[in-house]
Image (cartoon, helix red, strand yellow):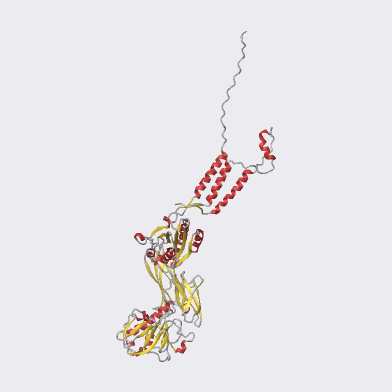
């Protein structure tokens, strides 16, 4: 089914302006030379032209004029690139989903040029829009980590094509499922035939997201398989250098080769805004292999909490996964603040469990000193015994034997005499690898948390340990003094304290509530007194941020890199949060997408090159015809005039002599 003729370059019609000068040349009088002739009878018409005052003469349709005008018309239309649409997209309503994940930034060969997969996808989307039938409308969606409507349902092809320019690649692991669900939701209520076309490179973290949709889905793949190497994992920790016995920053990376040939790569590590290389390694990664790389350096005091950049060279078709980002840990030793009404009279059991860990530093203070600015580092592990202050700075929190009343959401109630432990939350990270069997407690306070899921240790008379965590910290409340039990005499108490310290150390090292990946919300733990938070992205642009209870949340981060956070308040400061891609699904640029689903629900998958071009250009045909007219015109003007043949004249016979009749 062919569609009406289109002019892909209408500016070429400007050549039609030469028709005017061409006609003028044919109506202008020729200036003739004066010559003497014997008679003007044969030159009467020329004489009339000379006598006339107008410089123009009457236009006479001549063969050269017609040939030259036709050649000019054809050349003008050839320059305008006339084209007919080779195929039409059937359907009253069409949803076009363009994959905007990180792998779409990879470059592929497109004829003599090299284009990114996103550029190829835009071209395919333009061809599809040009192929829409009369009366059809289209919806344009962008599929990154989340789905975004780029253009609502519209019949204006020009406006839809303009909206394609807003499509951009995000440094995220794509999720086409959300975009398909959104497209189905937008088209479900419409009448007539409905279709969904997905344009992707086939690097899908969840290919099954395309199957099972209630509307027909067609997948068009762009790009060709290319070799690629990537950093698929990064982790930075503090350790001790065995020879010098100094603190050491250790970076653990995993480099994967998704190509079919071995790759020789240089892996380097440097600090943000610094050109000096802190550490480097040369590795040879076999095809399909993942190789672990360890880089380390001895930090100076000014290096703590600074951003780290990792790079593999040489770069390849997809540069976003050739880099990774991290942060120098705050230090190997975890600061612990022990707060009590009398700092000289603290629990020796808890103190002994803390100082037995060589990676901790203990500082005791009174409840009054707790409120002084700078008394507690923002990522310290805080132990409060015999009190429950309204505001506790620092990081993770352990409250032991608080007074009756409300304490961080938990109500501390009556005293329980000799409560017998019946169960505990063994799946909680704080209760890993320990057992409370045989632990005897002489007295404890009954605790009533806000919800049953916050119960950590239960007895036959009630709960005696609860979870008081907030979005910015992990908090634990023990309703009894460990000295009023035999728990410190058992190995489970040492394991419990080690679990708390290890959790606090992990939170301190990362500073966020989980690994930061591009495309997901960035959650950063700040002091509870923080206010006026500002966030700058890797490119220096300011981002929206919400702050509640010390938890700063950036709703969406679409770029990998280092995010700078700064806040005001009594504990003003700044923070660097890294975000990475680290996705094997996006970095495997050599994969070929197979049809999804089976039977009637199978999704049709075709390569963009296998699809007929939406435009069949005819400019070259018109140019050839124009050339034919020019050649004919040249022949016509240079031909020799053909003379009409004349019959040979018969020779005249002399007249016969007259004969007189005989008399």
Q: Position of residue 510 (x, y in %)?
A: 43, 76
Where is residue 200, by image quadrant? bottom left
388 or 298, nearer to the observer: 388
402 or 5, nearer to the observer: 5
Q: Position of residue 260 (x, y in %)?
A: 38, 61
Number of callouts: 0
Q: Position of residue 280 (x, y in %)?
A: 43, 70
Where is residue 514, by image quadrant? bottom left
Image height of 512 relative to 220, above or below:
below
- In this view, which residue lies farthest toward the left? 438
Where is residue 386, by image quadrant? bottom left
As drawn, is 38 to the left or to the right of 535?
A: right
Residue that appears at 42% across and 76% down: 513
Quadrant in which the C terminus is drawn = top right
613 or 429, nearer to the observer: 613
102 or 265, nearer to the observer: 102
Answer yes or no: is residue 300 visible.
Answer: no
- In this view, which residue lies farthest toward the top? 663
Image height of 623 relative to 565, above or below:
above
Q: Position of residue 215 (x, y in %)?
A: 40, 62
Answer yes or no: is residue 16 visible.
Answer: yes
As drawn, is 46 to the left or to the right of 278?
A: right
């Amino acid at each position: 089914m062919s569609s009406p003729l289109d002019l892909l370059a209408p500016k070429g019609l400007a050549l039609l302006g030469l028709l005017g000068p061409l006609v003028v040349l044919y109506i202008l009088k020729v200036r003739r030379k004066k010559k003497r002739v014997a008679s003007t009878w044969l030159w009467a018409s020329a004489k009339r032209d000379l006598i006339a005052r107008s410089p123009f003469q009457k236009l006479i349709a001549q063969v050269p004029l017609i040939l030259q005008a036709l050649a000019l018309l054809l050349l003008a239309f050839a320059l305008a690139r006339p084209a007919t649409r080779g195929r039409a997209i059937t359907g009253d309503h069409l949803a076009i989903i363009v994959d905007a994940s990180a792998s779409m930034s990879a470059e592929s060969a497109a004829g003599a040029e090299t284009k990114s997969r996103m550029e190829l996808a835009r071209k395919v989307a333009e061809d599809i829009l040009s192929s829409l039938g009369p009366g059809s409308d289209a919806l344009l969606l962008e599929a990154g980590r989340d789905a975004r409507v780029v253009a609502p349902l519209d019949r204006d092809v020009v406006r839809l094509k303009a909206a394609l320019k807003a499509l951009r690649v995000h440094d995220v692991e794509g999720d086409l499922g959300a975009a398909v669900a959104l497209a189905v939701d937008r088209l479900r209520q419409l009448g007539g035939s409905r279709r969904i076309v997905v344009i992707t490179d086939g690097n899908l973290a969840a290919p099954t997201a395309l199957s099972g949709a209630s509307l027909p889905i067609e997948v068009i793949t762009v790009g060709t398989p290319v070799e690629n190497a990537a950093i698929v994992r990064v982790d930075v920790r503090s350790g001790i250098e065995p020879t010098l016995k100094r603190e050491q920053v250790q970076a653990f990376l995993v480099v994967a080769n998704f190509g079919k040939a071995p790759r020789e790569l240089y892996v380097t590590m440097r600090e943000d805004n610094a050109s000096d290389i802190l550490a480097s390694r040369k590795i040879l990664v076999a095809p399909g292999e993942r190789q672990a790389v360890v880089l380390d350096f001895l930090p100076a005091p000014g290096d703590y909490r600074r951003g780290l950049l990792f790079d593999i060279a040489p770069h390849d078709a997809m540069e976003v996964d050739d880099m990774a980002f991290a942060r120098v840990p705050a230090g190997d030793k975890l600061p612990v603040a022990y707060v009590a009404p009398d700092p000289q009279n603290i629990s020796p059991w808890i103190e002994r469990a803390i100082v037995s860990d060589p990676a901790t530093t203990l500082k005791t203070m009174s409840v009054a000193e707790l409120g002084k600015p700078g008394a507690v580092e923002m990522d310290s592990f805080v132990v409060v015994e015999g009190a429950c202050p309204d505001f506790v700075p620092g990081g993770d929190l352990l409250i032991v034997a608080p007074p009756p009343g409300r304490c961080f959401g938990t109500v501390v109630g009556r005293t329980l005499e000799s409560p017998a432990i019946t169960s505990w939350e063994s799946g909680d990270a704080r209760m890993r690898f320990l057992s409370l069997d045989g632990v005897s407690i002489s007295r404890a306070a009954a605790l009533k948390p806000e919800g049953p899921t916050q119960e950590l240790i239960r007895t036959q008379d009630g709960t005696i340990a609860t979870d008081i965590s907030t979005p910015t910290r992990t908090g634990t409340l023990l309703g009894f003094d460990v000295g009023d039990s035999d728990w410190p005499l058992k190995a489970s108490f040492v394991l419990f304290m080690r679990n708390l310290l290890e959790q606090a150390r992990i939170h301190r090292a990362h500073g966020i509530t989980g690994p930061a990946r591009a495309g997901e919300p960035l959650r950063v733990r700040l002091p509870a007194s923080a206010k006026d938070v500002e966030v700058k992205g890797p490119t220096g642009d300011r981002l929206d941020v919400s702050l509640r209870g010390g938890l700063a949340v950036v709703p969406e981060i679409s770029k990998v890199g280092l995010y700078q956070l700064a806040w005001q308040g009594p504990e003003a400061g700044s923070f660097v949060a890294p975000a990475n891609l680290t996705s094997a699904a996006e970095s495997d640029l050599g994969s070929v997408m197979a049809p999804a689903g089976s039977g009637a629900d199978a999704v049709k998958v075709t390569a963009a090159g296998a699809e007929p071009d939406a435009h069949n250009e005819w400019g070259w045909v018109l140019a050839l015809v124009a050339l034919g007219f020019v050649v004919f015109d040249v022949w016509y003007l240079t031909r020799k005039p053909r003379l009409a043949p004349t019959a040979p004249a018969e020779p005249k016979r002399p007249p016969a002599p007259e004969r007189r009749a005989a008399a």
